[in-house]
Image (tube, rainbow, N blue to C red):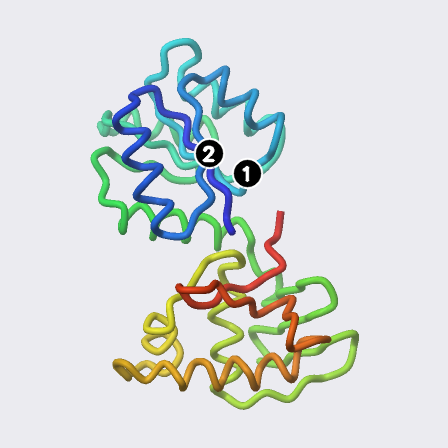
Amino acid sequence: MVAILLIEDDPLVRRGLELALSRHGYDMRTAGTGRDGLRALDADVPDLVLLDLMLPDLDGLEVCRRIRAGGDLPVIMLTARGDDLDVVGGLEAGADDYVVKPARPAVLDARIRAVLRRSAGDPDGIRTHRDLRIDTTALTVSRRGEPVTLTPTEMRLLLTLSASPGRVFSRQRLLEDVWEHDYLGDSRLVDNCVQRLRAKIETDPAAPEFVQTVRGFGYRFGPVQG
């Protein structure tokens, strides 16, 4: 599950975003000040930081600069201030994106996924997850150096899931993204394809490492990259 640290001083906004993004499948952690946020980062590094600009002790720009000085952790600036100078200041401080509040959770979820995709990158179209290698350009897959033959649908399913490690996909979402049609209610298509894919890429399909079931929700790709 993708871990997100939300640094936001307004308790109502903080709680609202925490609940809303949790429903989108994120592991939400929160801090109410810039300094508390930096301490939380030192204790446990998340996959992405949602950072309010106006904080009481250490403003968001300074927090962003300190995060960026320590590495490439993705940062989305989240603030009510949306004039051009603020946007430019946030991006120049190192933010990967800038979202003006209020933002609908679905929109924020899309922006988070876009930033995570860019930050993960696919150098030369290659995705490597432990001993599983996916060439998204040549559309080939290998495990421990041995080629794995997938059907076109299995390949599309693997490409969809592996593009966002840790993200939970519902069966309906996978039907729309992979099959590109509205197979409403026919989730067996997904389950059957997952079983075939697991048989080809997992060491133990009964205890899958890559295509994991999230009970009551759907599937996600693991292991989650830190």
Q: Is residue 99 left or right of residue 7?
A: left
Q: Residues within 10 Å of mark 2 (few under 14, many from 20)?
A: some
Q: Position of residue 158 (x, y in %)?
A: 53, 75
Identified at 58% across, 38% down, the residue is: 72
Q: Say which element carries label 2.
A: strand
Q: Is residue 21 left or right of residue 123?
A: left
Q: Please name the amino acid that badge 1 sits on.
A: Pro
- Closest to the camera, between mark 1 and mark 2, is 2
Q: Nearer the viewer, residue 168 or 38?
A: 168
How far is disc 1 from disc 2 in space, using C-alphas? 8 Å
Query: On residue 29, which mark appears?
Result: 2
Query: On residue 46, which mark appears?
Result: 1
Identified at 49% across, 18% down, the residue is: 36
Q: Residues within 10 Å of mark 1 (few under 14, many from 20)?
A: many
| Relative to 37, residue 136 above or below | below
Q: Earlier in the sequence, mark 1 or mark 2?
A: 2
Q: Say which element carries label 1.
A: loop
Q: Residue furthest top?
A: 57
Q: Is residue 116 left or right of residue 111?
A: right
Q: Position of residue 128 (x, y in %)?
A: 67, 64
Within the image, what quadrant is residue 108 found in?
Answer: top left
Identified at 52% across, 84% down, the residue is: 154
Query: On residue 26, which mark appears?
Result: none
Identified at 24% across, 25% down, the residue is: 81
- Whether the residues at callouts 1 and 2 have beta carbons within 8 Å, the answer is yes
Q: Is residue 139 left or right of residue 179?
A: right
Q: Position of residue 153 (x, y in %)?
A: 47, 86
| Relative to 157, residue 67 above or below | above
Q: Position of residue 207 (x, y in %)?
A: 65, 70
Q: Please name the amino acid that badge 2 sits on.
A: Arg
